[in-house]
Amino acid sequence: MSDLIALKDLSPAISKNFEMDAGLISTCQNLNDLKEKLAHAISILLNRDMNRLLNIFYRMDLSEQKVNRIISESAPQEISSQLADLVIEREMQKAITRSKYKPSE
């Protein structure tokens, strides 16, 4: 799956769940740009509203074990980046599943 297709499929869910400006996400040129912006949003929530962040992860159906492992075992400066990777990975799984079962036109 190319970055452009993945971005198109990932952007709406990520912008909705993290209440990010869809225009901001649409400026992302590749997955690294998306990861950077998402890591920044996660970092803010980590510092200001951990319960809200955990609720978002729950709604996104992220593995609680993976989230807890990242939070407890990662270096503090790496946590938001690794959580962003986890979010992107999960949203990619969902996008692949949706495209797999999407009715043919």
Image (cartoon, rainbow, N blue to C red):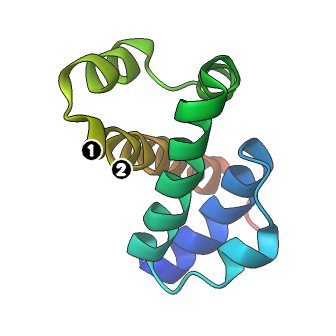
Residue 59 in sight in this render: yes
Residue shown at 59% from the left, 44% from the top:
44
The residue that label 2 is drawn on is 81
Task: Give the image location of residue 66, x and y in percent.
Answer: 33, 21
Could you say whether the residue bearing mark 1 is in a helix, strand or loop? helix
- Give the vertical position of 41 relative to 76 (above or below): below
**Residue pictured at 80% horizontal, 49% vertical:** 19
- Residue denoted by label 1: 78
Q: Amino acid at mark 1?
A: Glu
Dividing the image into 4 quarters, which one contains the N terminus? Answer: bottom left
Q: Between 54 and 46, which is closer to the camera in this rendering?
A: 46
Is 71 left, or right, of 10 in this rendering? left
Q: Does residue 85 sit above or below 73 in this rendering?
A: below
Q: Position of residue 48 (x, y in %)?
A: 64, 31
Residue found 32% across the figure and 43% down from its top: 82
Whether residues under marks 1 and 2 lie with C-beta atoms below 8 angstroms apart, the answer is yes
- Alpha carbon distance from label 1 to label 2: 5 Å
Residue 85: image location, x then y, percent:
37, 49
Q: Residues within 10 Å of mark 1 (few under 14, many from 20)?
A: few
In this rendering, does residue 1 appear at all? no
Q: Quadrant of the C terminus?
A: bottom right
Extreme residue toward the front, this view: 48
Q: Amino acid at mark 2?
A: Ser
Quadrant assignment, res 3: bottom left
Q: For label 2, count other residues whose C-alpha is less than 10 Å away and answer few (under 14), some (14-19) or many (20+).
A: many
User: In the rendered image of this protein, does residue 31 appear above or below residue 86?
Assistant: below
Q: Taking 9 as reference, is 47 left or right?
A: left
Residue nearer the viewer, 77 or 91: 77
